Image: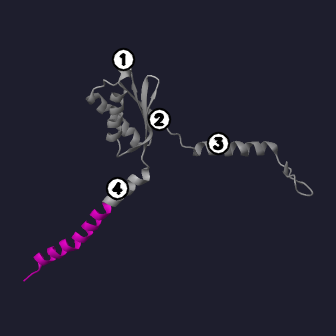
Amino acid sequence: MEIAANADPPVVKVIDMGKYIFELGKKERQARKAQTKIEIKEIRLRPKTNVHHRGFKVADARRWLEHGMKVRVTIKFRGREITYPEIALEDLKEIAEALKDVSKIEFAPSMEGKSMTLVLAPEKPGSKKAEVASLEKPVAKAEKAEAPAMQEKAVDTVKPE
């Protein structure tokens, strides 16, 4: 195998071709294993979808976003419903508002044929953990501060006279 063709004299290395092909395949398999596959889940609604039914769909979307999946919210129009796209736009805005604590809007609502689509991506998982950690630390500090005070009170009440 030629290693450096531009060198004077050219550098050449004798290798086992079967071993070389095996090593290349092994590197490709490792690269594929390291890839993360982003799954996109979809919620399909209509402009006349009941608020209660939409609540179930939003709960599913919340669960998927918390697991790190993207969610595509699609509102399909039938017949004359397409003449009122503002109804669907309002529904999509309400869904995005309900999920804003666990997601961010990746693609704004857009019309594609007879449907309007919105894509939500999960928030960065590190930021949520940091918020939880920051909330827990003050509580832990307060408990530690209370513990010696409680022990002192217990000692005061048990002192023999």
Position above or below: 97 against 45: below
Specify the quadrant of the image occupied by residue 89.
top left
**Main SS class of the magenta portion in the image:** helix
Identify the element where label 3 is drawn. helix
**Residue 150 versus residue 138: which sits nearer the camera?**
138
* Residue located beneath label 2 in the image: 40
Q: Which quadrant of the rendered structure holds the C terminus?
A: bottom left
Residue 51, horizontal then vertical, whole percent: 27, 30
Residue type at tag 4 = Val
Q: Is residue 60 magenta?
A: no
In terms of sequence position, does the residue under pointer 4 or pointer 2 come before the other? 2
In terms of sequence position, does the residue under pointer 4 or pointer 3 come before the other? 3
Find the magenta span and give its range: 136-161
* Residue located beneath label 4 in the image: 132
Q: Residue at x 37, y 36 (%)?
A: 61
Q: Residue furthest left?
A: 161
In terms of sequence position, does the residue under pointer 3 or pointer 2 come before the other? 3
In terms of sequence position, does the residue under pointer 4 or pointer 1 come before the other? 1
Q: Nearer the viewer, mark 1 or mark 3?
A: 1
Q: Residue at x 31, y 60 (%)?
A: 136
Label 1 to label 3: alpha-carbon separation? 52 Å
Q: Nearer the viewer, mark 1 or mark 2?
A: 1
* Residue located beneath label 1 in the image: 80
Q: Nearer the viewer, mark 3 or mark 2?
A: 2
Specify the quadrant of the image occupied by residue 154.
bottom left
Label 1 to label 2: alpha-carbon separation? 29 Å
Label 3 to label 2: alpha-carbon separation? 24 Å
Proximity of marks 4 and 3: CB atoms separated by less than 8 Å: no
Q: Residue at x 15, y 77 (%)?
A: 155
